[in-house]
Image (spheres, rainbow, N blue to C red):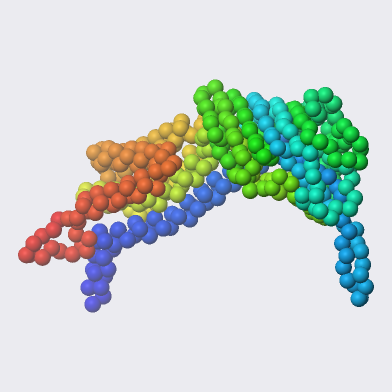
Amino acid sequence: MAASFAESFNRLTRSPGFKFFLVVLLIFILTIPLALVWFVVNERENRSAAVKQELAQLFGGEQQLIGPLLIVPYTVQIKRIQDNKEIEETHERYATFLPDDFLAEGEAKSEIRRRSIYEVTLYSARLKLSGQFSAPDIRLIEPDAANVRWRDAILSIGLSDVSGLKEAASLRIDGGRTIAFEPSIGLPDGHAPGLHVRLFPVGGSIDQAPGTFRFETELVFNGSSRLTIAPIGRNSQLVLKSDWPHPSFNGAFLPESREISSDGFTASWRVPHLARSIPQAWRTDAQQAGSIHATLFPVLSGVSFFVPVDYYALVNRAAKYALMFLSVAFLAVLVLELTSGRRIHAVQYVFVGLTMILFYVLLLSLSEHIGFTLAYLIASGATGGMLSLYTGKAMQSAARGLIMLFVFLILYGLLYLILRLEDFALLAGAVAGFIMLTVTMFATLRINWSGEAASPAGQQS
C-alpha cells in the first residue's frame, strides 16, 4: 500500500501536468521581486521629479500668465434687520474688468540643464502684451455702488512664479505715459502673486472713471516645462514661437494654426469671449479678492516643453508586460524540456525568471546614463543571450539553445515595438498574447500531461 502510494506520488510529480502547474506557481512567486522592481522604478522617478523641481525653483517654475485686469475697489451699503432694528453696513468689493482686445506674442528660447544624471527643460521668454480697455461702467455689475475709489484702481498681471522675472517691467498707456510695475497684486489679502500699477489718473479727474485706453507692456522671465496664458480679451490672440522641437499644446484651447519642425515651432490662438464662458466684468467681495485671478485659471492655454523620451515611463510600461513575457519564456523552456528527455529543475526555472526580472533593473540603470534605446539593446542582448546559453547548457543541446535565442529575440523585439506604439500598445499586446498562447497550445497538443501510460487503443506521445 505504501509502495503503491509512493509510486503514484512519484509518477504525479514527474508528470508534465504537475510540472506545468509548478511553473505557473513559480511565475506567481516571481511577482514578489517584480513588485520590488516597480518600487525601484517609482523611487527613481520620484527622485528625478524632485531634482527637476529643485532646478525649476531656482530658475523659474511653470509659468501661468493672467492679465492685465482692471480692478476697481468700491463700497456698497447693505441694510439688514438685527434685534428688530434696521442696521446699515458698509461692505467693500472689487469690480474686475477685462480688455476688449488682447494680444500676447513672444518667443521662448529653450535649454536643457543637468544636475547629476537628471535633466530638466528650461526656457527664457520675452512676451509682449497689448490691447485696449473700454471705458469701465461699474453700474453694469453693481448699480448700488456707493463709493467708487477710482484713484485706487490698479491694472494687475498675475504671474505664477514672479521670481523668474529677469527685467523690470512697465506699462505704456495710449502709446505715451509709462508707469513702472510694482510687485504683488496690491489687494488687501495679497493672495494672488503678480505685478500691478496704480493706473490713475489716465486723463481727466482722479475721481472719475477713465475713457477707452490702450496699453502695452513687455515681460522677460524664465520658466520651466510649461508656459500658459489666459485669453482675457473679448477678442484674444496668442502667438508663441520657440526653438523647442517637441511642443505639446494643452489647456482649454488648442492653437488655431501651428508649424512644427526640427528648428522649433510657431503657434497662434484666436479665442472669442463666448468660447471663454467668463464675463467681461464681475464683482468680488473683499474676502475673496485673491480669487480674481483664480477665476481665469480654467481658460489658460499654451504649450508644454515636452520631453519625447521619458525612460521612467517606458520602463514602467515594460514592467507591466513582465508576467506575459515570463509566462512565454517559461512555457518555451517547458516545451523544450518535455520534448528533449532532459529534466530542468524548478530552481533552474527560478534562475531564468530572476534573470528576466533583472532585465528591467539593467534597463532602468543604463537608461539613466546612455538613453533608452541603447540601454534596451544592451540589457535585452545581455539577458537574452545569457539565458539562451544557459538553457542550451542545461539541456546539453546547442540546437535548443538557439531555439531559446530565437524566442528571446521575438520577445524583446515585440516588447520594444509595443513600447513605441503608444496609441496601439494595448492592441499590439493583446494580439501578441493571443498569438503566443495559440502557438503554445498547438505546440503542446500531443504532450501526455498526465504522465500515465498510453492506452492500447491509441497512443499519444
Which picture quadrant has residue 87? Answer: bottom right
Left or right of 418 in this view: 434: left
Vertical comparison of 143 with 125: above or below: below
Left or right of 395 in this view: 452: left
Q: Position of residue 446 (x, y in %)?
A: 17, 55
Q: In which quadrant will I find the N terminus?
A: bottom left
Q: Position of residue 254 (x, y in %)?
A: 56, 38
Of residue 246 and residue 219, the one placed in the foreground of this image is: 219
Q: Position of residue 216 (x, y in %)?
A: 76, 29
Of residue 209 and residue 424, the one placed in the foreground of this image is: 209
**Residue visible at 39% across and 57% down in the picture:** 26
**Residue visible at 74% across and 33% down in the picture:** 132
Vertical comparison of 20 with 303: above or below: below
Q: In which quadrant will I find the C terminus?
A: bottom left
Vertical comparison of 314 with 9: above or below: above
Q: Position of residue 392 (x, y in %)?
A: 29, 41
Vertical comparison of 332 with 218: above or below: below
Left or right of 77 in this view: 37: left
**Residue visible at 36% across and 40% down in the picture:** 414
Of residue 120 and residue 303, the one placed in the foreground of this image is: 303
Specify the farthest residue to the left.
457
Residue 385 appearing in the image: yes
Residue 246 appearing in the image: no
Specify the farthest residue to the top.
263
**Residue visible at 81% across and 36% down in the picture:** 211
Left or right of 292 in this view: 354: left
Q: How many marks?
A: 0
